[in-house]
Amino acid sequence: QVQLVESGGGLVQPGGSLRLSCAASGSGFSAYPMGWYRQAPGNQRELVATITSGYRTTIADSVKGRATISRINAKNTVYLQMNSLKPEDTAVYYCNLHGPIGDYWGKGTLVTVSS
């Protein structure tokens, strides 16, 4: 059973930076695509970034140039570095693992961008 635990969220001022982490339990982490999604109040969950097992990344247009996704397979961890944060980046950020029989999700970490 895969479990994903996000960390690194919090309150940050506009223009600031955060690095979110997602630690995965279980085996075979390195073989699966991982991603970060977010959901703001009243909105649907949306894709932020993904990274394949071969380290190919995709970044949503809304955060392109401000977000970087990376993974360290030896640590079973995926990261999301967010810079130049804006109030509209405020959301709960969820980690996703796209496994062979379905998707796994963490419980999320709240990012609040406010002065």
Image: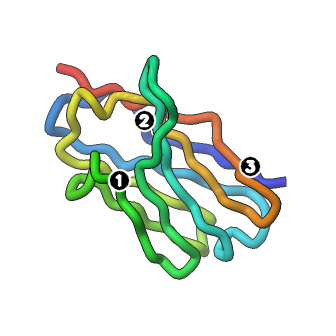
Q: Which mark is residue 3?
A: 3
Q: Which residue is mark 2?
A: 9
Residue drawn where x is 77% and y is 55% of the image: 102
Q: CA distance from mark 1 to mark 3?
A: 25 Å
Given the image, on which type of amino acid does mark 1 rest? Ala
Residue drawn where x is 65% and y is 57% of the image: 97
Quadrant in the picture for residue 81: bottom left
**Relative to 81, residue 85 above or below:** above
Secondary structure found at label 2? loop
Residue drawn where x is 17% and y is 20% of the image: 115
**Relative to 53, residue 15 above or below:** above
Q: CA distance from mark 1 to mark 2?
A: 19 Å
Q: Which residue is mark 1?
A: 60
Q: Nearer the viewer, mark 1 or mark 2?
A: 1
Residues 84 and 41: in front is 41
Please identify the quadrant where the N terminus is shown: bottom right
Residue 27 falls left or right of residue 7? right
> Residue 16 at what x, y percent from top left?
19, 39
Mark closer to the chain start, 1 or 2: 2
Residue drawn where x is 54% and y is 72% of the image: 52
Residues 18 and 47: in front is 47
Secondary structure found at label 1? loop
> Residue 75 at what x, y percent from top left?
59, 67
Residue ranking furthest to the bottom: 54
Residue 47 falls left or right of residue 84? right
Mark closer to the chain start, 2 or 3: 3
Given the image, on which type of amino acid does mark 2 rest? Gly
Task: Assess whether mark 2 and mark 1 are in contact (beta carbons under 8 angstroms).
Answer: no
Secondary structure found at label 3? loop
Crowd band around label 2 with a 10 angstrom C-alpha radius: few (<14), some (14–19), many (20+): some
